[in-house]
Image (tube, rainbow, N blue to C red):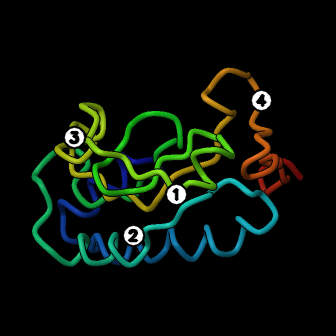
């Protein structure tokens, strides 16, 4: 189900944001060991946000992941696929405008996904986190 359909279910009260967030977390926990896509989780914080009053936007309550390449949130890790930043546990000092807009749209950020080092490649195979893998789900069988 795409983000628009999920947001509509939340607006209609047919599902809660917390239910969507928990469902997305379960899917990540199931698939990420094989994919190596999500490199930093903020699941507990996302659940807290889903229980609280979310910004009223077109995607209120919809779970979302941001790439570990820009789109920083102050006080949260930022690695940009770099071993140096990862090993030094770099914390973003400021929130990027894009992150502010994603939040204002009502999305609930579940974490950060793997990225090529400093977003300089077209494939996601950083030394910091290792490659992100493709797996065939039901739709490609």
> Which is more N-terminal, label 2 or label 1?
2
Q: CA distance from mark 2 to mark 3?
A: 21 Å
Query: Quick one: 32 or 26, which is closer to the camera?
Result: 32
Q: CA distance from mark 1 to mark 4?
A: 24 Å
> Which is more N-terminal, label 4 or label 2?
2
- Secondary structure of the residue carrying tag 3 is helix
* 10 Å crowding of disc 4: few (<14), some (14-19), many (20+): few
Instruction: Place residue 71 in its image quadrant.
Output: top left
Label pair 2/3, CB-CB below 8 angstroms? no
Give the residue at mark 1: 89
* Residue 102 at least partly seen: yes
Give the residue at mark 3: 100
Mark 2 or mark 3, which is nearer to you?
3
Q: CA distance from mark 1 to mark 2?
A: 30 Å
From the top left corner, tell me how far across and down residue 108 is, in percent.
32, 59
Left or right for 43, reference 119: left
Q: Residue at x 64, y 39 (%)?
A: 115
* Residue 14 at least partly seen: no
Q: Which mark is residue 20?
A: 2
Q: CA distance from mark 2 to mark 4?
A: 29 Å
> Which is more N-terminal, label 1 or label 3?
1
Instruction: Place residue 54 in its image quadrant.
Output: bottom left
Q: Residue at x 56, y 54 (%)?
A: 88
């Amino acid at each position: 189900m795409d983000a628009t359909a999920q947001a509509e279910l939340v607006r209609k009260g047919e599902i809660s944001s917390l239910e969507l967030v928990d469902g997305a977390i379960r899917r990540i926990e199931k698939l990420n060991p094989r994919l190596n896509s999500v490199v930093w989780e903020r699941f507990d914080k996302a659940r807290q946000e889903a229980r609280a009053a979310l910004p009223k936007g077109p995607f209120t309550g919809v779970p979302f992941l941001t790439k570990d390449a820009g789109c920083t949130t102050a006080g949260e890790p930022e690695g940009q696929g770099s071993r140096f930043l990862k090993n030094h546990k770099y914390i973003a000092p400021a929130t990027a405008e894009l992150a502010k807009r994603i939040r204002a749209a009502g999305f609930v950020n579940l974490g950060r996904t793997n990225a090529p080092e400093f977003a300089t490649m077209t494939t996601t195979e950083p030394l910091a986190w290792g490659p992100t893998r493709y797996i065939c789900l039901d739709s490609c069988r």
